[in-house]
Image (spheres, rainbow, N blue to C red):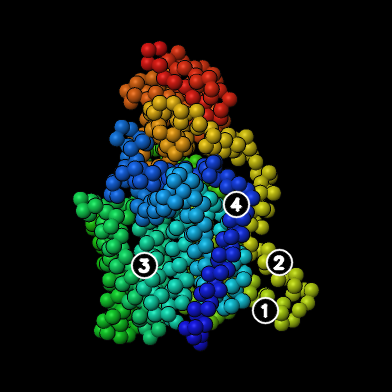
Amino acid sequence: MSTAKDGASTWRFDVVLALLATLAAFAINVCAGFPGLTNAGGDNDSLLRLVEVRDMLAGQGWFDLHQYRMGPEGGFVMHWSRLVDAPIAAIILVVSALTGSMAVAESVAQVLWPALFFCLTVFFTVRAARSFAGEGAVLPAVVVSATALHFIGIFSPGALDHHNVQIALTMASLSLLLEAPLRRPAALFAGLCAALTLAVGMETAPYVAAIGACVALLFVVDTSGERLIARNFGLGFAGVSAAAFVTTIPISAWGQAQCDTFSTVQFVVAALAGIGLAAIASVEAAGRTQLRRLVSLAVLALALGAVVMLLFPQCLASPYANLDPRLKELWLDHIDEAQSLLQLIAEDPASVVARYVTPLVAIILMALRLRRGPWRRQDSLVGMLLMVAFIVSAWQVRGSTFSIALAVIPLSAWIAKWRERAQASPSRSVSLRMAAVWLVSVNVVWTGAAAATSTVFEANKVAPNDSDADTSCQRKASFAQLAQLPDTTVLAISNLGSPILAYSGHRVFAGPYHRNTAGDLLALDAFLGSAADAKAILATHHAGLVALCRGSAESKLLVAKAPQGFLAGLTRGDVPEWLEPIAETRENPVELYRVRFDG
């Protein structure tokens, strides 16, 4: 058994490894010139997060989540959490005070924030691998996780979106639960991390539920070792959920149920689940026998289900059940991260290799471990969470970022096993097999293979020049001229919405967010309707500019949908008399037209 001193030394060692991996990734980004700071490359969420932080620093209220510069007049309420805005704003405030430059401060925050969570994710992955497979899995975990996380993209400079935060918190919760039998406070902090990742965004609800269910089932099977873990996890989960609710939801909204963000729905369920689990683990009569524990937890699960069905039945529907059919057809169905595995197989088979091979290999390894036995609590935690993440990724591609990260743990154990064999009985055959195991486990190898073979599947893919056009229309330089024009409302496709807000003082109708239904429909009505329809919409809403990215995939989709519409005519060069081309932007990927209502 390791001593407290040994535990402290391994923590320091793992911190050093995570920092070295982060420095290596940082060096790569330095050599690349931090391209994400000047070209978001389609990362609309990170740009809008920066806009939200700026708005908060400019005086917008803590509880006021309106995005006033997007949508119809008055804007719309975003579903993101201030728990992410606040620390980014703090970094900007500190750096701007030291440097005297807000621009420098924002750049530092855009680099430091994703790097911080890259480091934390690598650290907790290494800790989890150590608990799962011992010292031999540490080096493979560093290499495999660092390369996978770097090329996933959500930890790149400029990535202010909350998914990197959620992966770090999920890995932290798993790692702490794996260590909980040896470190009593670990389960409490695991519950804290699980509650925080849920408060940040609802995407992690399946992973949080899987973690909670696993803690409960382990308690059913082994009360002697798991009672305190279940109790502490439940208390941490309920306590932090309550704190998040009180600090991020205004009193006036405590009675409002929101299914897509942390609100009274999530708080009530989390509080009941956490307190219920802690109570069952604490009350002797409820946990005396395995049958009683199972029945008590079944009653708790039924109570949670009844609360949701009776009080919040609307949250049982699909997240996009009420989305306007036009937005589903022309927006949601074309978001890459919202596609299912079956859609990806049909439309982009090469990317399936990059996103699903290493998680699938990890699941096979866990299945082989289950067959060979004996099954351990570590296997239950890692196996359940990995399986849930893979199922989520089969439903929506965005889940693959979690399954790729979680797959590192069994893959590292696999590599460690072959490294041990190579050391025990060195031979060419064993060395070759160990090398093959390394190659199979490193996700970037599959990503490279997918990129190399993608030309085979070009028939149903967007042409390269379309991708180039989308990328060039996201560059900061493309909006320099727009930023110099007097602020007004701009009619543009949804993928230009966030860049326009981030790089200028203008406002827009459209943006790729499901709560901005009214604004997105206004833009669609203008682009798909006639020139006269567009003019009427622009006049009614006092829009002064039209922005065009003629080569983007979204523009081409809308042109194909309405070949005789306003946008189609504009891309053909049919400019109505009430629009005035701005000469300085003719060579710019983002073309601008001034609205003349006297025309």
In this picture, residue 57 sits left or right of residue 429: left
Outermost residue on the bottom side: it is 1
Q: Secondary structure at mark 1?
A: helix
Vertical side of 38 occupied by 366: above or below: below
Tell me the residue at 74%/81% (across/down).
425
Marks 2/3: CA–CA distance: 39 Å
> Which of 285 and 591 lies nearest the eye of the viewer?
591
Numbered disc in front, either 2 or 3:
3
Q: Which residue is mark 3?
A: 192
Q: Which residue is located at x 47 percent, y 17 percent?
A: 580
Q: Is residue 123 or residue 430 the one in the foreground?
A: 123
Label 1: how many Cα within 10 Å (few below 14, some 14–19, many 20+): few
- Badge 3: few (under 14), some or many (20 or more) residues near its Cα, within 10 Å? many
Disc 4 + disc 3, Cβ < 8 Å: no
To which quarter of the image does residue 428 belong? bottom right
The disc at residue 436 is 2
Query: Dot 2, crowdedness within 10 Å: few (<14), some or many (≥20)?
Result: few
Residue pointed to by mark 1: 420
Q: From mark 4 to mark 1, how far is it between C-alphas?
A: 34 Å
* Rendered location of residue 413, percent (x, y): 59, 73
Q: Quadrant of residue 519?
A: top left
Nearest to N terminus: mark 2 or mark 3: 3
Provide the residue designation for mark 4: 29
The answer for how far apart the CA atoms under marks 4 and 3 are is 32 Å
For the residues labelled 1 and 2, the Cα–Cα distance comes to 15 Å
Which is closer to the viewer, label 1 or label 3?
A: 3
Residue type, label 4: Asn
